[in-house]
Image (spheres, grey):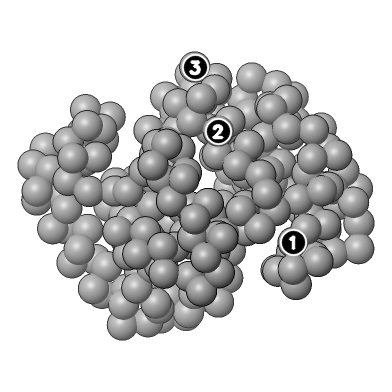
Amino acid sequence: MQPPNPPLLLCDADVVFQLFIGRSTLPLKCLRDRFGVQPTVVPEVDAELLSRPRSDLASRYRTASDSGLIQVLGVPTIRRIKSQLSGAIAEESPDAIWQRLQDLRDDYYRYVDIGESSTYAAALTLQMPTTSNDGNAIRTLLNNDVEVPVPVLRMFDLVAFAVQSGEMSVDAADDLRSRLLAAKEHVPKAFLNAGFADGLEAFRPRLVDGSSRCSVRVANDVVVLTPR
């Protein structure tokens, strides 16, 4: 039996900004509205997003935050989802869970930036999926024998998922890809010289809609969601 969808997806700053640069929040809306998964950032990432030099991107983030499309993690969030947590942590109080998260963040901060530290700490503590494009941070943690969430979703995993779910067209995904390339943003190797549909096979998505057949090979470790 397919387990219930996680209530949160922890998002790092680079993923959120790439969606804004690509001028599409459809992947986030798909997760929230159709699958009941709330895109969420930690307070450190919230501060980073609001302080980015490009005021237009900060403004778009503020709009998404004010509308509830993206929420900021805190003790009230943990209190709200506590009944959906599993394992020993489910027996702890929201304040104790928050402190545990902060302690793990401080351990990670010895190796990587504060945004990644807090995002990965939240994902591991709460056992929620996370998304980040920062492969260097992940490799640094692994090289220092530090546990990281598995799998870490990439921004294009969210796009591929929205396409598979029928909430986003291939043309819209190609438009997002083109905007990122024009802005000299990181794009996975599979999509550098190939359109979205052609690059998807080599990309091997890590996020899958369990209600529909995925027509391409997927990664070994995947997150499977089902519509509400």
Report, in whole angstroms, how far the alpha carbon at label 3 lies from the one at label 2: 14 Å
Q: Quick check: can you spot residue 15?
A: no
**Mark 1 sits on what residue?**
180
Q: Position of residue 217 (x, y in %)?
A: 78, 42
**Mark 2 sits on what residue?**
29
Examine the rendered structure and indicate whether residue 3 appears above or below residue 178: above
Report, in whole angstroms, how far the alpha carbon at label 1 lies from the one at label 2: 20 Å
Seen at 74% across and 68% down, the residue is: 183
Foreground pick, 207 / 221: 207
Foreground pick, 23 / 131: 23
Kind of residue at badge 1: Leu
Task: Determine which quarter of the picture holds residue 209.
Answer: top right
Kind of residue at badge 3: Arg
Foreground pick, 187 / 178: 178
Q: Position of residue 176 (x, y in %)?
A: 76, 50
- Drawn side of residue 6 relative to residue 16, left or right: left
Q: The residue tagged with tag 3: helix, strand or loop?
A: loop
Kind of residue at badge 2: Lys
- Drawn side of residue 210 relative to residue 181, left or right: left
Q: Position of residue 194 (x, y in %)?
A: 91, 56
Examine the rendered structure and indicate whether residue 25 appears above or below residue 214: below
Marked residue nearer the N-terminal end (1 or 2): 2
- Drawn side of residue 153 relative to residue 80, left or right: right
**Mark 3 sits on what residue?**
228
